[in-house]
Amino acid sequence: MNDYTKEREASIKKLAAEQVLPNVQWFPGHMTKARKIITENLKLVDVVIELLDARIPYSSANPMLQEIIAGKPKLVALNKSDLADPAITKKWVNYFRSQGIKAVAVDATQGKGIKQLVQITEDLAKDKTEKLVSKGAKARAARVMILGIPNVGKSSLINRLAGSNKAKTADKPGVTRAKQWIRLGGNLELLDTPGILWPKFEDMTAGLKLAFTGAINDEAIDRELITEVFLDTMLKLYPARISERYKITDGLPETALELLELIGKKRGCLMKGGVVDTEKAQRIVLTDFRSGKLGTISLDVPPASEETENNLEKD
Ligand code: G4P
C-alpha cells in the first residue's frame, strides 16, 4: 500500500470517527441520571449481569461499570454470539476467566447459553443468600439485574429469560415497591427493567465499531464513510469473507472505496451512465454484516491475543 493510500485511509477513519463520536456521546445529565437509576436498583440485587456484544466485547463495555457496581458479583454475558467468531468468543470467555470474572456466551434470540447463564448467576448469588439464611432470614431467591449499552440485547435477554413467566410479573410490596420482578424457576428473580449504560465515547476505534454494529443511530452518521472504514477493517481481518460473499474471484482491490464500488457493480447498484450507486452498495454491506451474512465476525480481540489482529481467518 502506498503512502497516498495509507494517508487517505487514516484521514477517512478520522473523518468517520469525528462523525460517530458526537452521536455516541451522552450528555453529562443523562449519564448522571442513568448512574443514579443503576445505583438505586443495585441495592436490590445480589448479582449484576453485564451484557456485552460478543462481536465487540471491548467496544461495547461501559468504562465506569466496575466503579458503579462497587464489588457486586458480576457475570459477563457475551450476547449475539451467533454473529461473532466462535474461536474469538472462546478467547474472550477465557480472558474474563483469567481476570477472575465469570463469563458466558449467549444468543438471546435463540436461547443459546441461557441455562448456563442462569446456573452461574445462581452460584454467584449463593454467598449472599446463604449468609442471609445463616443470620436467621427466610431463604429467598437470588435477585439479578441486567445492564448494558443500548441495542446490545437487554430486552431480548429479559424476554428470553422470562418466557411465559413474564405474565406473572408482580410488585413486591415492602421491599421493592413499583419494581417489577420476574420469577425464573425457584431460585432466581429478575428485575424487569434493564439498566442502560453509556458506551465508551472517547475511543475513536470503539466508536467506529459501535457504528458498524448498529449500536449508534444510523440516521445521524455518514453511512458511506462508515462502510468504507468497515470494509477497510474487513480487508485486514476477514478478506476471504468479502471475496466469498460478493463473488470476487480475481483478487480484492487494495482500497475500501474501490471495494465498495466493485461490490456495487457486482450487485447491480448502478445509476445513469454506469456510475456506481455507493449509497445502495453501502446499505447492502452493512445489512449483510449485521445480519450475519458475512459469516461470524469479531472485531475486538482480548488483550492477550492482540497480536492476532491481522487476518483472523488464519487463526
Ligand atoms: P436493548 O434492549 O439492549 O436495547 O436491545 P434489544 O433487546 O432491543 O435488541 C436489539 C436488537 O438486537 C434487536 O434487533 C434484537 O432482535 C437483536 N438481538 C438481541 N439479541 C440478539 C442475539 O443474541 N443475536 C442476534 N442475532 N440478535 C440479537 P432489531 O433488529 O432491533 O429488532 P428485531 O430484529 O427484534 O425486530
Image (tube, rainbow, N blue to C red):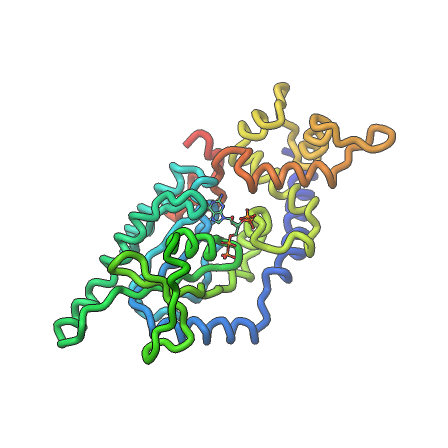
Image spot of residue 213 (x, y percent): 56, 47
| Most foreground residue, 65 or 190 | 190
**Which quarter shows the C terminus?**
top left
Image spot of residue 308 (x, y percent): 43, 38
Which residue is painted at 48% across and 33% down in the image?
311
Which residue is painted at 45% across and 59% down in the image?
148
Image spot of residue 43 (x, y percent): 34, 74
Image spot of residue 295 (x, y percent): 50, 33
Farthest residue to the right: give it. 273
Farthest residue to the bottom: give it. 174
**Which quarter shows the N terminus?**
top right
Which residue is painted at 68% across and 47% down in the image?
223
Q: Quadrant of residue 195?
A: bottom left
Farthest residue to the front: give it. 167
Farthest residue to the top: give it. 250
Q: Quadrant of residue 220?
A: bottom right
- In the shown orientation, is residue 258 left or right of residue 103? right
> Number of callouts in the render?
0
Which residue is painted at 41% across and 60% down in the image?
167
- In the shown orientation, is residue 263 left or right of residue 81? right
